Image (cartoon, rainbow, N blue to C red):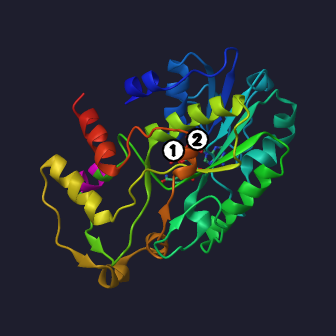
Amino acid sequence: MLKELVKRCSPLPSGSRLLILGGGFTGQHVASLARKLGTEVICSRRKASHNANIVFDSKATVLPPNEAFEGITHLLSCIPPTNSGEDPVIKILGNQMIKMPLQWVGYLSTTGVYGNCKGEWVTEADPAKPTQPRSQRRLACEQAWQESGLPVQILRLPGIYGPGRSALETINKGEGKMIEKENQVFSRIHVDDIAGAIMHLINLAENGKKPLIINVADNIPSANTEVLKYAANLLGKQLPPIIKFEIAAKDMSPMALSFWQENRRISNKLLCENLGYQLIHPDYRSGLKDCWLQYKI
Ligand SMILES: NC(=O)c1ccc[n+]([C@@H]2O[C@H](COP(=O)([O-])OP(=O)(O)OC[C@H]3O[C@@H](n4cnc5c(N)ncnc54)[C@H](OP(=O)(O)O)[C@@H]3O)[C@@H](O)[C@H]2O)c1
């Protein structure tokens, strides 16, 4: 919850100006937190909207005015790769970014770059071995950011959830399929913890602590059925019967199937033990309870 988050986070250094490219689900949360902490935030979307103060669309080549880039000290890119695997921000704004007085640049990537780890724990020291084409494109974007000459930090994220986008909505829409696959787990992160971790990382970077790649995940990778069961309990709703993966797979889209083909437990030790970030939602129970409480506000 934003109120709780504000209490826990330190503000950015005074005089900071944060540019968020791609103010979608995560970008909006980061923007709200940074604003509450007193930082000036400029946020883009592809169309003019009440929660974006600039428009940026790489495909339509709609660019923000030059003034939007003046005095930007911190930048966060939440924009996914293009279909050809290029990073739209580097491609279109690369020359402009080099001229900004940037102290910190965050790039939101995915833990999909690790590929299939057969259910093992994965740390940042493990090699990226993406198997899905979308994860190969993502790794290419990570590499472009690393080679950009900017003070980049790459955040690798598993499934993002939060108020308005969680297992509660899945259940409410009647889309909660109880698919069981032995030993299969998924890692997750509540969007508040992405925002909180970003503030934490920016402040650490000020003090010279800035690992290039950080996993931002909660403590307990879990089976989807477990998460759906907890969500259904909160809502007082019935779940459909369990269905074996081998049967469910016959009706899955290639995209859905690709998620089930990979199995990994994302370790957050670097973030939470070495760098001292305290998760607000250490597991899906805490996170879903928060989403559920916000229904009632
Ligand atoms: N969702 C997940 O579970 C998950 C997991 C791991 C990593 N990620 C990655 O983490 C990042 C943030 O995720 P999210 O769920 O917050 O994403 P999101 O809500 O879809 O936000 C993506 C943002 O990028 C903007 N965007 C997309 N294509 C663009 C383009 N060609 N030019 C300019 N802007 C463009 C969108 O503009 P509009 O606001 O106009 O739509 C939106 O603001 C994304 O890169 C995502 O792929 C997501």
Residue at 50 percent across and 19 percent down: it is 36
The residue nearer to you, when weighing 140 against 182, is 182
**Residue 55 position within the rendered picture, expressed as x and y whole percent measured from the top left:** 65, 33
- Nearest the viewer among 257 and 270 is 270
Q: Please tell me which residue is depicted at 12% across the width and 59% down the height of the picture.
A: 238
The residue shown at (29%, 58%) is 227
Badge 2 is on which residue?
275
Q: Residues within 10 Å of mark 1 (few under 14, many from 20)?
A: some
Q: Is residue 238 left or right of residue 96?
A: left
Circle 2 Cα neighbour tier, 10 Å, few/some/many (<14 / 14–19 / ≥20): some
Observer-nearest of 111 and 270: 270
User: Does 171 lie within the magenta span?
Assistant: yes
Quarter of image, res 289: top left
The relative height of residue 223 versus residue 278 in the rendered view (above or below) is below
Position of residue 77 in the picture relative to residue 249 (left or right):
right
In the rendered image, the vertical position of residue 159 relative to residue 137, given as above or below:
above
Above-or-below relation of 90 to 277:
below
**Residue 28 visible somewhere in the drawing:** no
Q: What range is drawn magenta here?
A: 168-173
- Residue 23 in the image, given as x and y percentages of width and height: 57, 36
- How far is the residue under mark 2 from the one under mark 1? 6 Å
Residue 147, x across and y down, in percent = 83, 52
Residue 208 seen in the current view = yes
Q: Which mark is residue 64?
A: none
Disc 1 marks which amino acid?
Cys
Quadrant location, the N terminus: top left
Callout 2, which amino acid?
Answer: Leu
Tell me if 185 is positioned left or right of 258 in this view: left
Pointers 2 and 1 in contact (C-beta within 8 Å): yes
Residue 126 forms part of the magenta stretch: no
The quadrant in which residue 93 appears is: top right
Mark 1 lies on residue: 272
